[in-house]
Amino acid sequence: MFRNIGPFELLIIVAIIMVFFGGKKIPELMHGLGKGINEFKRGTQGGEDPAKAPEAPKA
């Protein structure tokens, strides 16, 4: 599908994205995307972050 994308085509795509979202919104979108990918990886591995795990009740 995207076999022959050259640097000029990538530059055009980036320019269009900048027009739609603006310069300030893109870092926020990338931050959210990174968090989503990390959550997905953590979910597929079956483990949870031990810092976020609830503590056992004390008797």
Image (cartoon, rainbow, N blue to C red):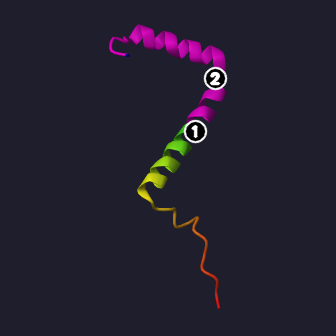
**Residue 29, horizontal then vertical, whole percent:** 60, 33
**Which residues, given as a range, are shown in magenta?**
2-30
**Residue 18, horizontal then vertical, whole percent:** 60, 17
**Residue 35, horizontal then vertical, whole percent:** 55, 45
Q: Residues within 10 Å of mark 1 (few under 14, many from 20)?
A: few
Labels 2, 1: front one: 1
Tag 2's secondary structure? Answer: loop
Residue 22 visible (yes or no): no
Q: Quadrant of residue 1?
A: top left
In the drawing, what numbered circle is on residue 31?
Answer: 1
For marks 2 and 1, give the CA distance: 14 Å
Who is closer to the viewer here, 11 or 59?
A: 59
In the image, residue 39 above or below residue 32: below
- Of callouts 2 and 1, which one flags the residue occurring earlier in the amino acid sequence? 2
Say whether residue 27 is left or right of residue 5: right
User: In which quadrant of the rendered image does the C terminus lie?
Assistant: bottom right
Main secondary structure type of the part rendered in magenta: helix
**Mark 2: which amino acid?**
Gly
Q: Residue at x 58, y 64 (%)?
A: 52
The verdict on residue 47 being magenta is no
Residue 6 visible (yes or no): yes
**Mark 1: which amino acid?**
His
The verdict on residue 22 being magenta is yes
Q: Residue at x 55, y 66 (%)?
A: 51
Tag 1's secondary structure? Answer: helix
Residue lying furthest left: 3
Residue at the disc numbered 2: 23
Q: Quadrant of residue 17?
A: top right
Say whether residue 26 is left or right of residue 44: right
Task: Confirm or deny contact between disc 2 and disc 1 (CB under 8 A).
Answer: no
Q: Residue at x 55, y 13 (%)?
A: 15
